[in-house]
Each structure stands twice: as C-alpha cells, then as structure tokens.
C-alpha cells in the first residue's frame, strides 16, 4: 500500500502526523547519523588535543560502527519525535496559512524545535546556543524534507527505507570527502600545542587525587603525590607509581612518546624514573600530561597550571 490519504479533522488541519510520516522520519533520521558522527569525529580529531593517545578515538568510532545496526533505529525514533515530526507539523501549518511553496517551509521549520531544545539544554547544561541550535537544525533539516518528499511521491514504506539506506551511504561518502578536503584546505584549524618558555613553565601544577608539581625558576622541583614512570626493575607491571619529594627539572625539547616539547622531571630517591611531561592544553589554559603504558589504552594523567 502507498501512503494513502490522511483522515480526521486534526490530520487535515496539519496538527498531527500519519504513521507513515513517523516511518519516513525514523528512516532518514537514523540514516544521516553515520555521516553526522563522522563529521563530528573528524572535527574533534582535528581541533582537540589527543594527548598522544594513538588510535584511541578511531577505536571508539569503530565500536560505534559495530553497534550501529542496533543504535540507529532507536536514535532515529528519538530524532523523529524531538525534531522531525514537530517540524513537519509546523511546515504544513505554515504552508496552509502563509504564501510560499511547501518545501521552503519544510526547510525552515526545523529551526523552531532547534531553538526550543537548544534553549532548554542551554539552561540545564550550559551548552552554547551558537553551536547547539545550528547542529539541531541541521539534524532536523533532511528528515523533514524527506517526509515531505515521500508524501508527495507516494512511496511505499519499503521504498522509503531502501532509499534512506542508499542515502546513508551517499551521505557518509560525502562527509568523508568533505571532511578530508576541509582539513587539507585549512578550513578546519588543526590543534597545535602551545609554546611555553621556561619562565612560563615555572609555577605550580595540580592534577587529580591531590597531585601537585612545583617548578621553580632555578631548576629545582618539588612533587606531592605525583605519578611517575615506574622503576626499570619494577616487577609489578604498573603503568606508573606515585612519588613525592624534591628534584630537578628542565625544558625538554620534542622528546617522549608524544613528540612534543615539555618538561623532564628528575625526582630524588628510588620512587620512580625520570618522567617527561608533555605540553598540552592552550595558551590561556596550559597543561602538562603523561600517557603511561599502552598509547591506545594507557593511563592519562594531566596537570593544570594553578593561577594566582
């Protein structure tokens, strides 16, 4: 059977949707998510500090792809009720009361639920409207247009789903090519760690579990509860040991597993070995970090510079 004609006063007035509308919204709502997730991953991989974590992000993306057949229908239904179907209703009401072709209203309508949910998440979680609203509107755009197109073409439901599956592959390929070209062309500014002088490195650095590192301008250092490389003769196969006490430090140019400039810390005693702390973060919020153990699944410890 095709889409058929909707019946009832509410449906004829555009105040609700047919089951076929939900099916179409779910189909493309889920079908576009692999491409959207790929674009997000490309952007995050380019602009965020990976802390020398090797293929950790790629492995996470691979795990998501493995579970995609189970997740996409669920996420498609969620996006349909949150973004697409409210947009469809608004588009049909606008098309009946205001001049202009229907596809135009289907393209504009997703902005309204995006503003609603963007404002709500801004109040509850502090998410920035300038990012949340455009992302939500973009996620609602294609499924809303898809519902209108499917209704006009009177497609059968199986036709809607196989076309959405082909569209998912096409969108994924476009996202991959577009993300690669944007990165190569410099449209996405890749992350670069800050360049810190010895004077900027001197100061107090603090991390989780009470870790503290005090670097003095004369080259002396003092540590409290600081993770360090385990001794070479350690037979416990630990990623790191927790050390404290006095020692020395010096700027360390482009060494360590990350290939970044940083700090070579030498603590007195037999607690741990010399440890290279790499520079990360940003110029306004610098960090020192060490990734102990396996680069793909080791223990990441970060110190942030104390202010004041």
Image (cartoon, helix red, strand yellow):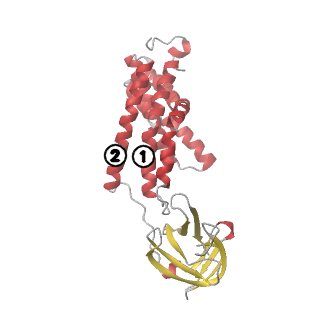
Label 1 neighbourhood size at 10 Å, few (<14), some (14-19), many (20+)? many
Residues tagged 2 and 1 counted as in contact (Cβ below 8 A): yes
Q: Quadrant of residue 306?
A: bottom right
Query: What residue is pinned by disc 2?
Result: 178
Q: Quadrant of the C terminus?
A: bottom right
Q: Quadrant of the N terminus?
A: top left
Foreground: 276 or 197?
276
Secondary structure beneath dot 2 equals helix
Side of 300 relative to 259 (left or right): right
Label 2 neighbourhood size at 10 Å, few (<14), some (14-19), many (20+)? few
Determine the residue positioned at 46% across, 23% down. 92
The picture places residue 285, in percent across and down from the top left corner, at: 53, 67
Foreground: 192 or 173?
173
Q: Is residue 292 above or below residue 91?
A: below
Q: Quadrant of residue 167?
A: top left
Q: Is residue 205 visible?
A: yes
Q: Is residue 105 visible?
A: no
Determine the residue positioned at 68% across, 66% down. 209
Q: Is residue 80 above or below residue 259?
A: above
Determine the residue positioned at 48% across, 80% down. 251
Circle on res. 187: none
Circle on res. 39: 1
The picture places residue 161, in percent across and down from the top left corner, at: 43, 24
Q: Is residue 143 above or below residue 228?
A: above
Instruction: Give the Cα separation between the discs numbered 2 and 1.
Output: 9 Å
Side of 301 relative to 55 (left or right): right
Q: Is residue 100 above or below residue 222?
A: above
Looking at the image, is mark 2 or mark 1 earlier in the sequence? 1
Determine the residue positioned at 53% across, 16% down. 11
- Please give the count of numbered marks on the rendered protein: 2
């Amino acid at each position: 059977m095709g889409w058929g004609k909707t019946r009832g006063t509410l449906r004829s007035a555009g105040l609700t949707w047919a089951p076929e509308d939900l099916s179409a919204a779910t189909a493309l709502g889920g079908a576009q998510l692999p491409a959207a997730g790929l674009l997000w991953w490309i952007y995050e991989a380019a602009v965020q500090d990976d802390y020398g974590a090797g293929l950790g992000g790629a492995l996470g993306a691979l795990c998501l792809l493995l579970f995609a057949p189970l997740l996409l229908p669920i996420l498609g239904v969620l996006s349909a009720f949150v973004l697409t179907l409210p947009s469809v209703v608004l588009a049909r009401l606008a098309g009946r009361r205001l001049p202009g072709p229907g596809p135009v209203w289907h393209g504009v309508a997703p902005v309204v639920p995006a503003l609603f949910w963007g404002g709500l998440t801004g109040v509850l979680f502090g998410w920035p409207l300038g990012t949340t609203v455009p992302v939500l509107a973009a996620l609602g755009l294609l499924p809303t247009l898809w519902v209108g197109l499917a209704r006009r073409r009177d497609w059968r439901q199986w036709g809607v789903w196989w076309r959405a599956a082909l569209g998912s592959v096409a969108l994924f390929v476009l996202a991959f090519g577009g993300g690669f070209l944007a990165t190569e062309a410099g449209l996405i500014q890749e992350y670069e760690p800050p360049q810190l002088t010895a004077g900027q490195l001197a100061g107090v650095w603090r991390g989780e579990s009470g870790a503290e590192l005090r670097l003095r301008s004369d080259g002396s250092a003092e540590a409290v509860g600081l993770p360090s490389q385990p001794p070479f003769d350690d037979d416990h196969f630990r990623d790191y040991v927790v050390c404290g006490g006095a020692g020395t430090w010096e700027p360390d140019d482009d060494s360590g597993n990350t290939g970044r400039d940083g700090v070579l810390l030498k603590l007195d005693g037999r607690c741990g070995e010399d440890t290279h702390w790499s520079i990360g973060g940003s110029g306004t919020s610098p960090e020192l970090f060490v990734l102990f153990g396996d680069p793909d699944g080791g223990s990441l410890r970060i110190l942030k510079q104390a202010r004041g």
